[in-house]
Image: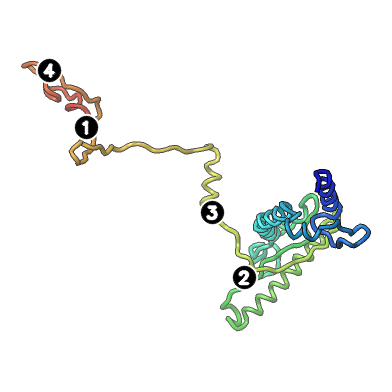
Amino acid sequence: MTRSMRRAAAAVVAGGLAATGCHGTGTATAHGPNAQPEGWTRYYNAVDPCWPERYNAVARAETLAPFATQVNNGRVLEQTIWNWHFESGSDVITPAGQAKLDAIAQVRPQPDGRVYMQVARDVPAYGAGGLDTVAARREELTAKRAEAVRKYMAAQPSLHGVNYEVFIHDAPVPSMPADFSARGYRGQALGYVGGLSTGGTAVTSTGTGTTTTNTNTAPGGQGPSGPGGPGSPGSGPGTGGSGGPNY
């Protein structure tokens, strides 16, 4: 095969790939828009014409899947009405619950019609009837609260015309120690506070395999001269370092 023939064959294969995408459904003998060039089966068995798009798509989906789950969980918690949004043991929505529902209905650009509600867990297990009836009492209160939420959302302004649905779930309550947030709120007026604390005494080596604590507070050096000539280190009445620092 000459160079010009090889170029022509490559052009035919490339044109077939561009026309049919990564994988065609036609055969080499078919006619019409699904027709494949001669040698297509041998070429497809030898190489992957979808590389790297096929593998990039799989890697992208596997990378985004956990993040998508996390986003959905956060969205559900954001749309949830909790037990403390009702009066204890009742289906009466508190002012805090009404404010929460109003905020859900005022989300821009369009409210989410899926409203979630925590199952009634504020029913005392050892109340009237005890453990034998606590499940039935919780289900009854949960149904009443869901109906109260539905009616309240139906009374929202009809600007967006959203048909709200109430879904019951029993997710763990997202929380953190209140002292953390309170401390951060009180300290925000001080701005950033940080640094390393210093102080105390340093442990140094004497050079003889033992350690001692250097408590000198004055610069080390040779003491003043005594009456008989130059003083030895640390001699004389001076306290100028007692012979210098310990090394």
Q: Earlier in the sequence, mark 2 or mark 3?
A: 2
Between 206 and 1, the one lying in front of the other is: 1
In percent of the image, x 21 and y 40: which residue is there? 211
Q: Give the secondary structure at mark 2.
A: loop
- Classify the position of the C terminus by image quarter: top left
**Residue 121's disc number:** 2
Across and down, in percent, residue 83 comes to 64, 65
> How far apart are the two marked residues, 2 and 3, measured between alpha carbons?
22 Å
Residue identified by numbered label 3: 178
Across and down, in percent, residue 102 comes to 75, 55
- Amino acid carrying label 1: it is Asn
**Residue 225's disc number:** 4
| Closer to the eye: label 2 or 4 | 4
> How far apart are the two marked residues, 1 and 3, measured between alpha carbons?
50 Å
Across and down, in percent, residue 134 comes to 62, 79
Across and down, in percent, residue 12 comes to 85, 50
Q: Give the secondary structure at mark 4.
A: loop
Do we see residue 208 in this rendering?
Answer: yes
**Residue 124's disc number:** none
Residue identified by numbered label 1: 246
| Closer to the eye: label 1 or 2 | 1
Between 180 and 84, the one lying in front of the other is: 180
> How far apart are the two marked residues, 1 and 2, measured between alpha carbons?
69 Å
Are there few (<14), some (14-19), or many (20+) residues within 10 Å of tag 4?
A: some
Q: Give the secondary structure at mark 1.
A: loop
> Residue at the right extreme?
32
Q: Earlier in the sequence, mark 3 or mark 4?
A: 3
> How far apart are the two marked residues, 4 and 1, measured between alpha carbons?
21 Å
